[in-house]
Every structure is written in structure tokens, then in C-alpha cells.
Amino acid sequence: MSAKSSPHAGRRALITGVTGQDGSYLSEFLIEQGYQVFGVVRRSSSENFERLEGVRERMTLLHADLLDQSSLNRAMAVAQPHEVYNLAAQSFVPTSWSEPVLTAQFTAIGVTRVLEAVRQMAPEARFYQASSSEMFGKVHETPQRESTPFHPRSPYGVAKAYGHYITVNYRESYGMHASSGILFNHESPRRGLEFVTRKITHGVARIATGHDKVLRLGNLDAKRDWGFAGDYVRAMWLMLQQDQPDDYVVATGETHTVEECCDVAFRRVGLDWRQHVQLDPAFVRPAEVDLLLGDASKAEAKLGWKPTVSFRQLIEMMVDADVAALEAKGAHKRS
Ligand code: NAP
Ligand code: G4F
């Protein structure tokens, strides 16, 4: 179906955090569905639109910052969106210990600012909040589901819990169509280089192509429920297509250690991780989330959502992309 003949043609979506991993996949998905997409970007001294390659010309970028209410109101007034996806955040957990106040400003209070902009300028718009499995932290039950109590272990997790509850509160206070997706870790070749999966796959690619010998990591025993970002943005959209707003866990239902991730990644290039990985206390956190494993049966039953990419496929896809990118760079340098 062409975008023009799609049932969603003429619908407008506004995405905060559009330059990030999820923002790029979501904008591609919505443009394919026929949406007019407005991406919110903050000012930077140099452009960082690499992830939007291919869709940059098919969307409208608006300048606004989660720290500035008037800029958000203006973006909302210009876009007049039917759907708002709030993906912007300071999303790297270790930075939330070194910059706890800024993390709270972006990741917690920023949600209230976006909700206020929607309430004042586009009150009929449907709203999606990017909540996180980090809210479960020191988990009270396994697997974690929508009813599992929160016990965040980082300033980031605490900020996300605020963002989750303020979304529920605006739904209950103002009758807004506001939904919260409690998404477990999701990755892709577009993942930031500092997150552990990408750090590993990029490190493996550098070692395989002779750029490096060693990869320094922290806690190899931590367990995560890792899925593919392309699958997870589909779940965000499905939440906003429901008659009633709600909260949903989005996860694969499988958990793996960081060590297993190393094993799959190094094997992909015919290497043994034990020969290359060194433990570095600098990457160990003051408080750890030991185990995340999600139960997405509500999302499956109500949204018809299921993941399509396995853990092994995901890590191998990321290694292949990192190796190909480094080889292309090398070839470019030689020519
Ligand atoms: P990401 O790659 O780190 O992207 C974050 C985005 O937020 C970037 O576009 C960034 O813009 C923007 N941003 C940060 N501070 C801002 C501000 N003050 N004003 C405007 N924009 C700002 O994150 P992601 O992996 O795509 O995740 C998307 C969302 O889902 C985040 O809220 C994250 O916390 C949440 N989440 C992620 C996962 C996961 O596993 N990926 C799981 C659960 C929840 P710049 O490019 O200018 O820095
Ligand atoms: O990849 P990570 O940095 O992701 P983390 O902390 O789970 O957070 C991500 O997922 C959340 C959803 O649960 C999101 F809300 C959040 O925005 C982000 O996208 O670390 C994963 C695990 C941790 O247990 C960490 O201690 O990997 C362990 N790890 C071991 N060595 C490392 C390293 N993490 C990083 N980043 N770097 C290391 O060298």
C-alpha cells in the first residue's frame, strides 16, 4: 500500500527524541504508514541527524527542548498532532549518577512539560510515554509484569518512575489518552556506542578488523531481556491505536547475561571472548539491576504484538553491521 492510500494518510505525529535510536525507527515506521511526522530536535553546535538518513527529507524538524516549556508549546501548536510520542530523555543509566539533577530535569520533569504542552495546545492528541523496565530495578517478582511493584536502582530509574506515574495521573486527572510503554532493553545497529550490546558488537568488530585487541567491560553476570528496537516501536504505535489508553510491558520473555552476549558476538567472527574481554571496575555501577525478564502477555493479547527477532539474530545483526561499517571505512581510506 502506498503512503497516500494508507488509512493513516493525513494523520500527524510528533516525536520527541527523534534523533535517538527509537526515534529513527519510529519515524520510518510512521512515514511508511502515511503519517506526517514532526520530529523535535534540540539545538546542537553540530547536526546529529545520522540516524535519520533516508527519512530526513520526508519529515519536519522542529526545535524544542524538554527543559523549555514555551518551546514545547510552540512545537505542539505548529504540529497540531493526533499522536505524540515522548521518547526524549537522558537515557544512559551511568550518567544518571554523575548528572542526577539534569537527569531528573530531562527524564522526569520533562515528561510533565510535554504533557502540559499537549494538554494546553493539542488536548485531543494521544500520548505515549517511554517508560522503562529500569523502574523494576531490584525486582520483586520474576517475570516482571504491569502489576509488579517498582524498586528503581538508579537516578534514571527513579526519574522514569516519576514519568510513568505523571502519565497515569494526567490520564486520570484530565481524561487524556495517555499510555505508558514499559519497554525492556531494545537494541539495534543504531544503538548508542556506550550501551553494553553495542559496546560489545562494536568492540568485536574493531578486534576482528585489527583496530583493537581488548574490550573492557563491567559486570558480566547482569541479565537483561534484550529485543530488537524495530519491533518495539511497532508496540508504541499499537498502544495509541487502542480505544482506551493503558500501560503495557513490552519484552521478549527471554533473559541473557552480558557474558552470553559476549559469547555470541565474538563467535560470530570466529573469536573466543575470554581472550579479549578484561574486567574494568570503572564500568561497575554503584547499584546494579541484576535481572530483568519481562512478561509481555498483555501486549500480545490486547495489541497482538510479538517480537520477531531472537537474541542471537539481534547480536549477530549488530556485529555484522559494525564489521561492515568498519570495513567500508577502511576501504574508503585506502581508495
Ligand atoms: P537515545 O538513543 O538515548 O535517544 C534519546 C533522545 O532524547 C535523543 O534524540 C536526544 O537528543 C533526546 N534528548 C535528550 N535530552 C533532550 C532534551 N533536553 N530535549 C530534547 N531532546 C532530548 O534513547 P533510545 O534508546 O532511543 O530510547 C528512547 C526512549 O525510550 C528514552 O526515553 C529511553 O529512556 C526510553 N527507553 C529506552 C529503552 C532501550 O532499551 N532503548 C528501554 C526502555 C525505555 P540528542 O540527539 O540531541 O542527544
Ligand atoms: O546496556 P546498558 O547500559 O543498559 P541498561 O543499564 O540496562 O539501560 C538500558 O535499558 C533500560 C531498560 O531496562 C533503558 F531504560 C535505559 O535507557 C537503557 O537503554 O547495561 C546493561 C547491563 C548493566 O547491568 C550493566 O552493568 O550491562 C552491564 N554492563 C557490563 N559492562 C555494562 C558494561 N554496561 C555498559 N553500558 N558498559 C559496560 O562496559
Image (spheres, rainbow, N blue to C red):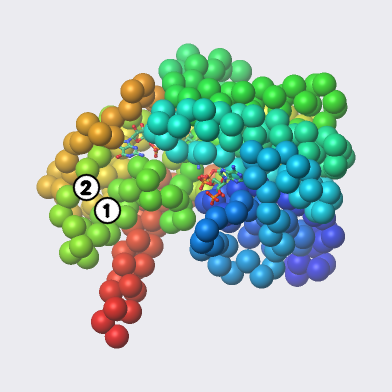
Residue 324 x/y as whole percent: 34, 68
Check residue 203 in the rendering and tell me which mark sits there, or answer none.
1
The residue at 27%/59% (across/down) is: 205
**Left or right: 24 with respect to 138?**
right
Asked if one can make out residue 248 in the rendered structure from this viewpoint, the answer is no
- In front: 131, or 47? 47
**Left or right: 109 with respect to 266?**
right
Q: Secondary structure at mark 1?
A: helix
Q: Is residue 177 above or below residue 149?
A: below
Alpha-carbon span between mark 2 and mark 1: 6 Å
The residue at 48%/14% (across/down) is: 140
Asked whether disc 2 touches disc 1, contact meaning CB atoms under 8 Å apart, the reply is yes
Q: Secondary structure at mark 2?
A: strand
Asked if one can make out residue 73 in the rendered structure from this viewpoint, the answer is yes
Query: Ligand 1, what quadrant?
Result: top right
> Looking at the picture, which amino acid does disc 1 mark?
Gly
The residue at 12%/47% (across/down) is: 275
* Residue furthest left in the image: 275
Q: Is residue 334 above or below residue 170?
A: below
> Looking at the picture, which amino acid does disc 2 mark?
Leu
Q: Quadrant of residue 121?
A: top right
Residue 318 x/y as whole percent: 38, 56
Residue 117 x/y as whole percent: 78, 38
Residue 208 x/y as whole percent: 21, 61
Check residue 153 in the rendering and tell me which mark sits there, or answer none.
none
Q: Say if disc 2 is inside 8 Å of ligand 2.
A: no
**Left or right: 5 with respect to 282?**
right
* Residue furthest front in the image: 45
The residue wearing badge 2 is 215
Quadrant position of the C terminus in the picture: bottom left
